[in-house]
Image (cartoon, rainbow, N blue to C red):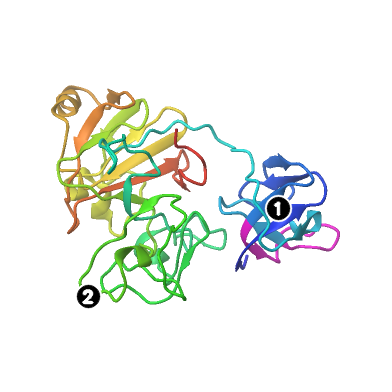
Amino acid sequence: MNLVQQIGSARVLRDMNIRSGAPNTTATPVPIKAGKTVAFVGYVTDGESVNGNAKWYKTADNNYFWSGNVEVVPNAPVTPPKPTTTAFLALPIKGNDDTGKPLTPCTARISAVLDHAGTSLDSTCKTPFSWGLRAKDRKVIAFNGEVGDGASCTTGPFGYAKNQPGPFFAKKEINYVGVYDMHDKYAPSWYLNYDGHCGYDFSYPVGTPILAPADGDLSKALLTDPVDGTNKQATAWDGFHTYYIDQRNGFFTWFLHATNLHHDIEKVLQTAKPAPVTRGQTIAYLGKVGTPGAHLHFEVRDKNNRIIDPYTDRLWL
């Protein structure tokens, strides 16, 4: 399918279903009442044909609705669809914001987002172009529909400015700070990082406590684990200090670049695998193993190893 990028809103003319993950009538339905307004980030013209019409609009959370049930309304207010998953994740970073309040998924410092263009989140993407180097297409699309496909920053793995340069996330959906480079033309938040990136980077100093986002079982990653990185070394504890938690509900959370695991976790792993953890427990300390700048790379995957965006899938508590 060929996705045409277009950000807009549509008014629902009759009760309909948003289809989870695919432009066809057999996909899992999410009901939407007539009179509501739904935002979209693009459309395809080669979805399932209904009454001779194969145009389907795509939402920011990678679902679709048939164009025959709506009319496009410029600048209309948006009524989001009901969440299809249950929130269960707490922020994996311990700390306070500039006002002294505990960090939240919306206030934590984020230097790179999950790229929705060319990765496994893109319905037009074909395997094995899942993420990383093989998913690079000189474009980054964020969960809120903003697109970076203009001027590039000066260092890899490369982020991109808007065609009309300006800051990303001006509405403060998240606290996006970008990455500083003295050679860049624009401010750090004017580049959307990174092309082909499959997670969120939380930018904090070395030694910042990393917390378990939910109850689960923690393991150090092995080279045999089914995770596709920019290179296979990135998937192993011996490479980028990668570890993961089976959240016991069909989701897995992955963590990269830690300085080390908490000594209690290490002690358990010496005698038993995996190590059980509880939400809010300190499990590791932020570092920069395998990367030039200190940050936590955090990603969410389902039981089929599919990349999940915790912001669009509403997984944050």
Give residue 167's quadrant in the image: bottom left
Q: Position of residue 101 (x, y in %)?
A: 31, 35
Q: Which residue is drawn at 41% across and 33% down?
A: 89
Residue at x 33%, y 51% (from the top left corner): 110
Residue at the (39%, 62%) spot, across then down? 196
Tell me the amino acid under the disc marked 1.
Answer: Phe
Task: Find numbered disc 2 in the image and state the secondary structure of the residue it sits on.
Answer: loop
Q: Mark 2, residues whose alpha carbon is within 10 Å: few (<14), some, or many (≥20)? A: few
Residue type (three-letter) at the residue carrying disc 2: His
User: Per the image, is 92 magenta?
Assistant: no
Q: Residue 43, can we see it?
A: yes
Q: Position of residue 14 (x, y in %)?
A: 83, 47
Question: Does residue 147 appear left or right of residue 293 in this picture?
Answer: right
Residue at the right extreme, as displayed = 51
Q: Which of 253 and 213 is in front in this view?
A: 213
Residue 288 as seen in the image, left or right of residue 154: left
- Report which residue position mark 1 lands on: 65
Kindly report the secondary structure that dominates the magenta region of the rendered protein: loop
Instruction: Identify the magenta region.
Output: 40-55
137 up-or-down from 177: above or below: below
Quadrant for the N terminus in the image: bottom right
Instruction: Judge whether residue 26 can be spotted in this image.
Output: no
The residue tagged 2 is 183
Q: Going by the image, does 13 lie left or right of 222? A: right
Residue 193, disc: none
- For label 1, the SS is strand
